[in-house]
Amino acid sequence: MASEADLKLLGTAVSPFAVRIRMALHMKGLPYEYLEQDLVNKSDLLVTSNPVYKKVPVLIHGGKPILESLAIVQYIDEVWSGKALNILPADPYQRATARFWAAYADDKLFAAYLGIFGAVTEVDRAEQVGETLAAVEQLEGAFIQSSNGKAFFAGDSVGFLDLVVGCHLFWLEAMGKMAGVAFLDTGKTPLLAAWAERFGETEVAKEAVPDADVVVEYAKKRQAAAAN
């Protein structure tokens, strides 16, 4: 088994992608040093570790940086494959399907709710709210397909898609509060709404996911700064 020594994670408290890595590390029971980053005044460590994008998260293992959250989760799962439960599905078809929906969540869902945060006009905001709701409805279908009637995307326990979609939940809740919309509606997406509640009660989520109010405060500060 690979050494667990010298694991560092560069992230920010409000980054869903850094939260994703914290959840994956917790699932595997891996000790690590978390280093909060200032993305306005970027540290030398962040810049040298990720010179192309200069963004978080970055996992540093034995002095070597691993970049991009989906790649980092897969790295963790492969390097420590004999430790705890596997994160990705073992079946090739299920793995490919999970990767498809992971890319969808990070592309469509993330872009939509981030658009609410950056919307300048009410028309823009309404458009982004609509796109977010549409993405959530698609993920309801993905849950039906992946869970086979069980509690989580991965079945009986938390797995890859649970981490991938779950790391976006606190931002969805925060943007919902700011826009006055419930994105996880028990009427329109009952299975996903029930999953989100179950996932929020897992030890993995409780260890890593911040309160949505932290994001609301962050968003309001960013919006105020942009207005000045």
Image (spheres, grey):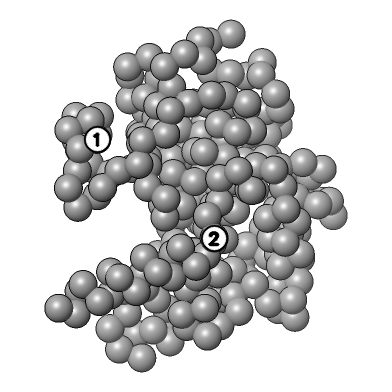
Identify the element where label 1 is drawn.
helix
Q: Amino acid at mark 1?
A: Leu
Q: Within the image, what quadrant is residue 85 found in?
A: top right
Asked whether 125 or 92 is in front, the reply is: 125
Pointer 2 local density, CA inside 10 Å: few below 14, some 14–19, many at least 20: some
Identity of the residue drawn at 72% across and 61% down: 197
The quarter of the picture where the C terminus appears is bottom left
Identity of the residue drawn at 54% across and 60% down: 211
Q: Is residue 112 visible?
A: no
- The span from disc 2 to disc 1 (Cα, nearest Å) is 25 Å
Farthest residue, direction left: 228
Q: Amino acid at mark 2?
A: Asp
Task: Examine the rendered structure and indicate whether residue 110 appears above or below residue 181.
Answer: above
Q: Is residue 31 visible?
A: yes
Q: Which mark is residue 211?
A: 2
Give residue 126's position: percent from left, percent from top: 43, 87
Mark 1 sits on what residue?
46
Identity of the residue drawn at 30% across and 43% down: 37
Q: Nearer the viewer, mark 2 or mark 1?
A: 2
Task: Examine the rendered structure and indicate whether residue 151 appears above or below residue 75.
Answer: below
Give residue 198's position: percent from left, percent from top: 75, 56
